[in-house]
Image: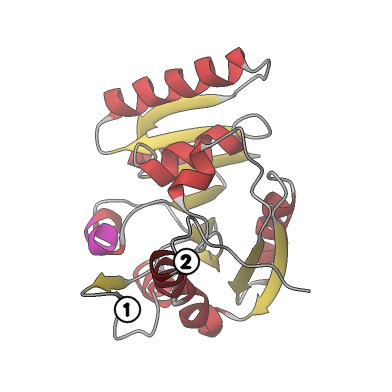
Amino acid sequence: MKIGIVGGTGDIGEGMARRLSSRYDVVLGSREAEKAHTTSECTIGLLKQRGLKSSCTGVSNQEAVDAAGVIILAVPFLHLESTLSGLSGFEGKIVVSPVNPMEKKDFFIPVPPPEGSAALLVKKLLPGARVVTAFNTIAANRWKDLDAEIDVAVPVCSDDPDAKSVVMGIVNGTSKMKAYDAGPLAVSSMVESLTPLFINVARYNKMRDVGIKFV
């Protein structure tokens, strides 16, 4: 399976590449292909030091979309629409949105778009894509810290059962994450609102990288 990461040179995208490229062929995209190439080489070198093989190729965002069957949108909500407007070829592909629309004031609050959630906006912008909400609550630090397992629950939403099953398989095969079916894409607003909540909990309780488990 080839997994493309749009925005793969940001902290979350780079962390995802570190975790996923030992199990999957990762095509790491960026607006600057050279930057993506450098990040992919660093990822391969880092995993090699740990005795792990890494399949990670750095390309442009468009090349990542073209090459992969599963595409992760590792971009901030602020740049989501402008990034997608410059890309094509998503039809029939699984598009994973870990995007959380939120705003920082004295504390963090969810600020969903008129569509209701980032995932529903993605569905509107990419009508032929098989959109799945997942990985929304995993902080960049957790993705990048290979010395620590990511032992958290990951809610997954989609209107496409087969796409949802594929993404849940990726979740369950990554570190110690556990995927949970959270329902249709309409539920994604609830999932996206968890991240600003977790940041506030971490801030006010002097914690770091707060996550959830279902028991």
Q: Which residue lies at the image location 30% right of the left edge and 64% below the top edge? A: 77
| Residue on which the image places disc 1 | 109
Q: Few, some or many C-alpha atoms within 10 Å of disc 2 (few <14, some 14-19, many ≥20)? A: some
Q: Horizontal and vertical percent for residue 141?
A: 46, 45
Q: Magenta stretch: give its range.
A: 78-82
The total number of labels drawn is 2
Q: Amino acid at mark 1?
A: Ile
Q: Locate residue 83, reporting x and y percent.
A: 26, 54
Q: Does the magenta stretch mainly form a helix, a strand or a loop?
A: helix
Residue at the image position 47 percent from the left and 61 percent from the top: 98
**Label 1: how many residues lie within 10 Å, few (<14), some (14-19) or many (20+)?**
some
**CA distance separating discs 2 and 1:** 31 Å
Query: Which of labels 2 and 1 is toward the front?
Result: 1
Disc 2: which residue: 128
User: What's the mark number on residue 3?
Assistant: none
SS state under label 2: loop
Direction from residue 4 to residue 116 in the image, left or right: left
**Horizontally, is 214 left or right of 63 in the view?**
right
Residue 199 in view, yes or no: yes
Q: Residue at x 71, y 69 (%)?
A: 180
Assign a secondary structure to mark 1: strand
